[in-house]
Amino acid sequence: MTPISPSRVPVLMYHEIADAAATSSKLAVAPEVFADQMTYLSDAGFNSLTAGDLAAILADGGNGLPERPVAVTFDDGYGDFYDHALPLLKQHGLVSTIFVTTGWIGLDGKAKRMLNWRELDEAVHCGTEVGAHTYRHPQLDQLPERELREELYSPKALIEDKLGMAVPGLAYPFGYSNKTVRRVAKERGYDYGYAVGNAMTTGGTDAFELPRLTVQRSTTMDDFRRMVDGEDTATLRRDRVLTRGYSVVRRAKSTARTARTAIRGGAR
């Protein structure tokens, strides 16, 4: 086991906790695998923080970070969080943050079941932080600013109204953000924003560009141990390369869209 610096924190990003028979998503982690991962965190002496508590501590220079800190986060708000993840987190005394897409709350389709408000309220009473993940799960960096403002405002207001709790932060859908997205998030009253990045979170990171480590179906226990212990893996390196490539493409699309808008405006 490699001791990690308390200023380098693994922030784990999960989506579905479901086996291959229930979902074809490559981001899904089987319940028994998730159980092994949480057992490792507990046995290895990790101390869990919510994403919001970690962001606040890092913003304060890292004062108050516990030994071997870790943050466990979930995106979208799948119902299997309540069915499979929450009981295991409670069993091991671990807290977490779930970033919910509010337009999906309560949906119960044949393939996917999303969390409902009762389950979210129960999770909050178990120490879970609920953050925003927009209303419709769009690619925020491709939205006109008017739509962007609504996507960031409405979920924060809705969660605070329904659960009676502050919502200090958000996670960007797909991990995508740009300067405009981060500026508007600040203006809408958020204190932090998590992306993906597939790197450790450090004290020098901008509070609206905090990275996370993707845990997915292909993540082996050896990869998981190395990941949370601060080591790099081939999968993390590959995903970082892909992320950089996507960023170039997305900036080009955004620039082209801005140019088209300017041309249409000038033609009026």
Image (tube, helix red, strand yellow):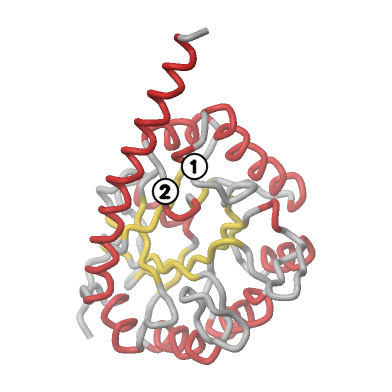
Tell me where residue 130 sits by quadrant: bottom right
Q: Is residue 12 above or below residue 18?
A: above
For label 2, the crowd category at 10 Å Cα-Cα, with few meaning under 14, some 14 to 19 and many 20 or more, is: many
Residue closest to the eye, 108 or 53: 108
Q: Is residue 214 above or below residue 88?
A: above
Q: Are marks 1 and 2 in contact (CB under 8 Å)?
A: yes
For label 1, the crowd category at 10 Å Cα-Cα, with few meaning under 14, some 14 to 19 and many 20 or more, is: many
To which residue does mark 2 refer? Answer: 176
Horizontal and vertical percent for residue 257? Answer: 42, 30
Q: Is residue 82 above or below residue 155?
A: below
Residue 66 - label? none
Element assignment for label 1? helix
To which residue does mark 1 refer? Answer: 140
Residue closest to the eye, 55 or 255: 255
Horizontal and vertical percent for residue 209? Answer: 36, 47
Q: Which amino acid is tagged 1?
A: Leu
Mark closest to the chain's N terminus, 1 or 2: 1
Q: CA distance from mark 1 to mark 2?
A: 7 Å
